Structure formats: C-alpha cells, structure tokens
Image (cartoon, helix red, strand yellow):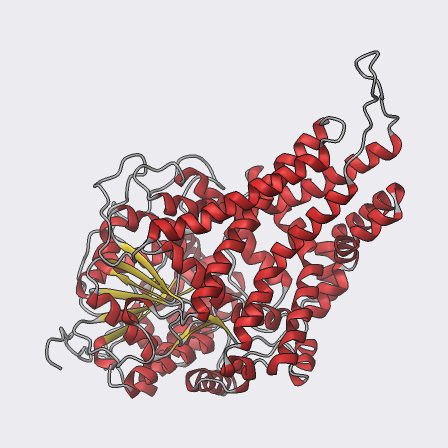
Amino acid sequence: MDGVSLQPVPQANQSGFWPNLPAEAPLAMPAQPLHHAPAPQRMPASEPGNMIARRLLVIGGAVLMTAAATHEMVNVLNVGGFTVLELLILVMFVTLFAWIALSFTSAVCGFVAQLSGGGTRLGTAQHLPLPQLSSRTALLMPVYNEAPARVMAGLQVIHESLQAIHALDHFDIFILSDTTDPDAWIAEEAAFLALRERTGNPHIFYRRRPQNIERKAGNIAEWVKRFGGAYPQMLILDADSVMTGQAIVRLVGAMERHPDVGLIQSLPVIVNGTTLFARMQQFAGRVYGPMIAQGIAWWHGAEGNYWGHNAVIRTQAFAGSAGLPTLSGRKPFGGHILSHDFVEAALMRRAGWAIHMVPGLPGSYEEGPPSLIDLAVRDRRWCQGNLQHLAVLPASGLHWVSRMHLLMGIGSYITAPIWLMFLITGILISLQARFVPPDYFPAGRTLFPNWPNVDPVRSMWLFIGTMGILLAPKLLAYVALLCDGPMRRGCGGALRSLLSILVETILAGLLAPVTMIVQSVDVGSILLGRDGGWQAQRRDDGSVPFGDIVRRIWKLTVFGIALAVAAYLVSTPLALWMSPVILGLALAIPLVAITGLRGTGQVLRRMGILRIPEEVMPPPELARSHALMRMLRDAPAEASDATLRLMSDPHLLAAHLAMLPPPRVPGRDPIDASLLVGRARIDEAPSLVAVLAQLSKPELAAVLGNADALHRLVVLRDAR
C-alpha cells in the first residue's frame, strides 16, 4: 500500500516463536508541571464556529434558570426572615439547581442538534466513503486481572473486522498486561498465543509489567516511552471494548486529516447487559446518551474530554503534553493520579491540541457493571480519582472549559452528600417548626409577629418545576426516539419504549437514594484519608450472595426507616412527599438483590421492556464477539494453577520464558522482596507440591517472572 510506513514482519526466534514485542522505538514523555504552563495554548483550526454564542446559550441559560429558581426559593423561605437552617438550605439549593440547570440546557441543545441531523464531526459520518489511511496505528488493550476469553474475543473481532475492509496492514495490536494474579497471567499468555495461532498475525503483541506503577496511566505511558515513536496514533481500548473496523478507520482517518487534533473520543454504546441493573444502564445510555453527548459535543467544541478508552490519540501530542505529575501529599489525594483521562485531555488542550468528541459515529461498544454493588466498587475508585482533581484544578494555563470538565467530575460525587445534607436540613427545619416553640417577638415590642413559616404554594410549584427540569431530558430523548424509525423499532416501538422509560425512571428513582448514601460515604471516607486501592472490575453475572448484600447495605435500610419516622412525626404529607426516598432506602436490600439478578433482566427482555436495537439485530461484530467468547469459555479446561499449567505444557513454558523481561540489574533495579522469599522457600522445599502450598500469590508471581527461580521449580518437578 503506497505511503504506508509498515513495520517489518517479526521473524520467528530460535525457539520457533514470533517475538512477543516489536523493536523498541522510544519516545520521551516527561511529566508536565502543573504550576506553570510550558507554552501558550493556541486555538485549534478544527474548532467549530460560533462557539461563544453556543456556550453563552448553554451556560447563560443555566445561569438565568438558576437565578429565577433562587428568587423563588428566597420567596419560599423568607416569609418571616431567614433562620440559619434556611440560609443553609438556600445555599445548597442554588448549588444543586445550577447543576441540573446546566445539564438541562446542554440536553436541550443536544436534542435540537440530534433532530437537525447532528452530523458526525471531523468528516467521520457513516455515509462518507471510508478514508484511505497513510500511517500505522497501535491498538492498545490494557488489562488487569481480566478474563482472557473476553479480552481475546474482542481483539479477534476487531482483527477480523479490520481484515474484512482490507485495513489490517495499518494496525498493530498490543495487549498491555498489569495483571498481578499469577494464574490469570499464565492464562493470558496462553490465550495470547492461541489468538496469534488463530489469526496468523505476528503483529499481535503481548507485554506484562512486573510492577504496575501508576496503574492504567502508567501502563499506557510505559508503552509510549518504549514503542510510541513508531506509531503516529494509538487507539486505547478497554477490556470490554469492541469496535468495528469501520469506526476505527474513520477515527484514524479523521486524525490524519486534522493535524491540529490530539484526541478524538467516540461514544461507546453499552451492550451485552443481562441483569436488570445492567439492562437499565444500557437502555438509559442508548436512549438518553446520544442526545446528551450531542449537546456536550455541540458546546464543548475542540475543548472536549477523554473517557479513557474507545478513543484515538496522536502519540506525539500525548507524549509531549500529557505526562502526569505525581501529586504532593499522602494518599488518597496525593500520589499518582487515578482518574487520569480528564487530566490528560486538559493537559493536551493546554498545549494547543484539539480534543473532540464524535457522538454520531456508530460502531463503538462497551459493557456496564452488572449490579449496583459492582457499580459502587467502581465508583469508589472513580470518586477518589475525581476528588484528586481538586489539586489539578488550579493548574496554570488550563482552558476554562477544561477546568469545567474537572469541576463537573468533582461535582458528580460532591453533589451526593449535598443532596443528603439538603434532605436532612429540610427535615430539621420541619421538625423545628413542629416541636420548637416559636419566638414571635424576638426583638421586643413590635406591631407584627415573626411567624416561622414558608410559602407552601410557592414551595409546591418550585418542586414541580425542579422535577420537570430533571425529567425533561428523558421526555426529549423519547421524542427524538419517535423521530428515528430504526431506533424506535429497535426499542420495541412507541408504546414499549415509553413503558421502558417509565420502568427505568421508577427503578432509577428508587435506587437513587441508595447511590446517594453510598457516594456520600465514599466522599467522607476519602476526606478522612482512606485509600480505596485498585480492584479488578467484575463484568459478568451481577448476582451477589444475599448475605453479602445485607452486610453491605443494612445500615441504609435502618437510615430509611429513621427518615420515615422523622417525616411522620412532622406530618403525614411530609412522609408522603418523601416516600420515594424512604421507599428506596427501606427496600434497598431487595432492590439491589432483584436488579442484580440475570433472571429478572431476561424476563423484561422477553417482554420487550428495556430493549435496545443491538439486542434485536446485533451488529455482526457483537454477534461474533459473543460467539467467540462462548467458544473460548467452553473450550476444554486447562489447569487453573499457573505453575502446574506451565510445568505440564513445554510449549507454553518455552514461550513464557521467551516473554520474560530482562533480569534485574544489581545496583540499579530495586530488590524484589517477594522474589527473595520465594527463592528461599524453593531452596528449602522437598517437592514442587510443598513449595506451591507455601508460596503466596505475590511470591508466586515474582518466581514465575524470574527465569532462574522458574528453572529451580522445573528442577523440583523433575526430582519427583
């Protein structure tokens, strides 16, 4: 292919294996300072027109709505003067209303953009011919203790899809492992070798880091520093990502045509949900998501954001401007940046690179958490990472829209405790009015008494208006769905899709108080200095043992009952008004259990409720991925124990040894304490079975990562 810079085809080594990695092409990636901008930012040439007017419409509209709501709230509360609690609730109301007002104005603009055709920015529209690529791109799949069948099925589908459109020669595939579990590591290596054998492609590579420093961000950065110089672009995937070859080629083609663009983010569609909770999430993402994303893209322009995967990045721009600094202080606020994607996008935009989202590009998919418990585990990590952005927010030279991204990321978790405080403060005001005798004449003699009261009529209308603003985007999304024939039919038709929206809204409303409490506890835990660590994400069945659910959230049920008692002591109408929150908390245990079951999700699927088009007529890539995953999972089981699997498979053992990194350099590389202990246990063990019973997982991983220690295990095996 003319004009393509092709990597040479790797040649098999003396052991008969293709090398697991290509020749290194180092690229410097220095950490970027936060307190001074290295260079003045420039306006990207790909910035859409009329951005000032667009942003004025969205942000100005939200400001006007908030001002009007604040005026009404002042009139509601200021009947006889403000109390301390009323001032507190006013401040919280303004903050929360501004949050939902901005979401509303952005969604309205997205609705208009979607109905007017929306378009796909940067020339990535589906109706345009596929671009002819002129460069080479690396597809990067970072993994951390993932199920190999899922990872390899997704990569094989991407490989086959690119091959079908004759674009495969422009891509190399890298599996970048940060896996710490030794059994999962060896399973990954075996799955990698099998993937190469099935595809016959030597341009699929595998690398495992012995130490997963800086987590996913460090995983990507290490690849950039070693191999980034050979690839003008890299496309970041997640372990559950599936992308069509056409989507990938359109993203890379857009990057080639726009030299000012540093990153292009696609809109992944959530798919493959089986539990009720997962199907709720994917329905909401499929129906409301495109409109919301269209609105965001419409007013963000070239100052878009990055979500960490299913995005193409200009490698040189990323290396030169997105190196993450280490934050000062102790964890959880200090140390390595966890939510790296927002910060990387902000730093790239600071350096003058455009960051775009293309919400209209089809062919980008991911999966969601199967249960509320799994969502809470993921949210704990994201919450800590987003709160870290408080240290990044004042960084010098950031574009003001980039600062908004950081603020909105922080606000997505901070608003939970604010909602909780707002709720509790409202109850306290009601309790005070009910049980504390009022002081009608606090300043001595006066003609008119100071009646402690609020305006009930204004309060009712303000509540109705606020709920209308919260629910309006869903109604707009339904209108947009009705105007899109294939989408309407894929969601079950006008009536079923409306019923699905009602079911999703009711269930989401009942689960919202649970999420509010969980996120509030997370924020409090982080503020107290507790680090959440890094846990692998569960992606399959969402069923959790009932006892575990009770143990995790019984306190929420108690809190819900306490709220019900407090509300009833004030008045029955207050208890009825708070009933959605009270019911959500009081029924938290059965709600979490039922929504996490596969059976409940499948019953609604058979009824056509919460259906999405990708369930009715799955794209070929999704159907192929599902079939491959089943095939790989149903294959004859290998030994699950890493060492026994290596000892029983000479081919895998030889490949494993060939893929090990160079040995430690004394005096330069740090000493691995786990390896020292593991070697000592091997030297003292009478047999292989005995030493395997003694080695901890970190020790076993260190032993399997050292050729000398591994050979000692082979000697023990042969000494039987």
Location of the C terminus (image quadrant): bottom left
Residue at left offset 63%, top offset 43%: 417
Which residue is outermost to the left?
A: 2
Q: Quadrant of residue 282?
A: bottom right
Q: Position of residue 197 (x, y in %)?
A: 32, 85
Residue at left offset 50%, top offset 60%: 108
Location of the N terminus (image quadrant): bottom left
Could you tell whether 262 is left or right of 640 in the image?
left
Could you tell whether 117 is left or right of 100 in the image?
left
Q: Position of residue 551 (x, y in %)?
A: 73, 56
Residue at left offset 45%, top offset 84%: 619
Q: Position of residue 388 (x, y in %)?
A: 46, 43
Is there any visible trace of residue 144 in the rendered image? Answer: no
* 115 and 634: which is toward the camera: 115
* 574 and 56: which is toward the camera: 56
Compared with residue 365, is residue 591 higher up or lower down, i.e. above or below?
above
Compared with residue 331, is residue 58 higher up or lower down, i.e. above or below?
below
Q: Position of residue 190 (x, y in %)?
A: 39, 78
Compared with residue 84, is residue 253 higher up or lower down, i.e. above or below?
below
